[in-house]
Image (tube, helix red, strand yellow):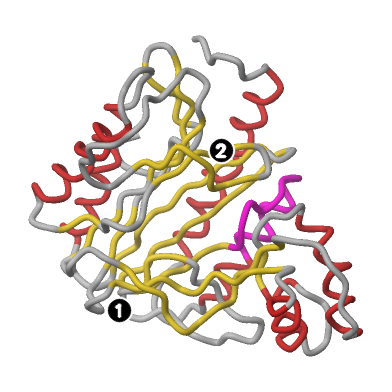
Amino acid sequence: MSIGELDTDAVESYREAGAILVETMNEAREMIEPGVTHLEVAEYAEDAIREAGAGLAFPVNISVDEAASHATPARDDDTEFGEEMVCLDIGVHVDGYIADAAVTVDYTGHDDMVAAAEDALEAAVGAVGPGVETGTVGAAIENAIEGRGYTPILNLTGHGVERYDAHTGPSIPNRAVDRSVELEVGDVIAIEPFATDGRGKVGEGATEEIYEQVGDGSVRDRRARQVIEELEAFDELPFAARWLDSSRAAMALRTLKNADIIKGYPVLKEADGQLISQAEHTMIVTEDGCEVTTAGIHDFD
């Protein structure tokens, strides 16, 4: 199996990250049930990843009902799961090489919407290969979701995955597009279809618990300087506010945002407030298709 210019160590790290993610995902998803808190699940998964000797590519995302992405619990969050649609999105890295995957756990009775996202992911995996246009993959996703009577989220896409960077090119659309690029052997991509019974667009909500360092600089505020020191441990990958040890971290984060040293990721929500399901895998493009590094979390794997 050829994997282009990726060296053996890189490939093994991608595979190891995927294996750790699969084990963690399958354990964490079993915890999602009414009465359990979001924080319990997030901290369990994050601790499991660290205990396995890997790193977090981003904070565990737990997006409920109309939320699509960027939702992670705050430090003292006591929110419990109810009869909801829950998207669990986990990112793992080994030496910077990333695995990114998501599943949906549903307590709303909308099994068919969950199946729409999973059908779309299965179709996309089957379409991936060298020379394939990303728009062709998007068409496969769109057809599968619409085939079950739902709408893909049009302004969210899959993405490339590179060392210490979970969101690079190429973008993998969730619909057919005219302008796209050809996949190449050795590309590492994360494909993540979202299905909804709304209009198929997301916008920014008011909540923000995930941040990323985007620049350097100096600030006078002592607490903000303390946070800058803590950021070194995150390898410029996204982090959760609750990971910080600093007292009054919220004020320090605002100071660093104003200084353009960090940026925040607001929770993304479906524009009509409708439900969203998600399914995601990471894969390496090979000469004869792709190798899914996160296989083992969806029924079709």
What residue does disc 1 label? Answer: 83
Label 2 neighbourhood size at 10 Å, few (<14), some (14-19), many (20+)?
A: many
- The x, y position of residue 139, in whole percent, is 20, 38
Q: Is residue 46 magenta?
A: yes
- The x, y position of residue 38, in whole percent, is 51, 75
Name the residue located 22 percent from the left edge and 46 percent from the top edge: 175
- In the visual, does 65 lie left or right of 237? left
Question: SS of the residue at dot 1?
Answer: loop
Q: Are marks 1 and 2 in contact (CB under 8 Å)?
A: no
- The x, y position of residue 164, in whole percent, is 68, 44
- In the visual, does 45 lie left or right of 156? right
Name the residue located 46 percent from the left edge and 32 percent from the top edge: 283
Instruction: Point out the frontmost of discs 1 and 2.
Output: 2
> Which residue is nearer to you in this view: 121 or 268?
268
- In the visual, does 215 lie left or right of 144? right
Q: Quadrant of residue 239?
A: bottom right
Q: Is residue 112 magenta?
A: no
> Which residue is nearer to you in this view: 87 or 241?
241
Alpha-carbon distance for marks 1 and 2? 30 Å
Name the residue located 32 percent from the left edge and 68 percent from the top edge: 202
What label sits on residue 18 in the rendered view?
2
- In the visual, does 195 lie left or right of 290? left
- Magenta range: 44-59
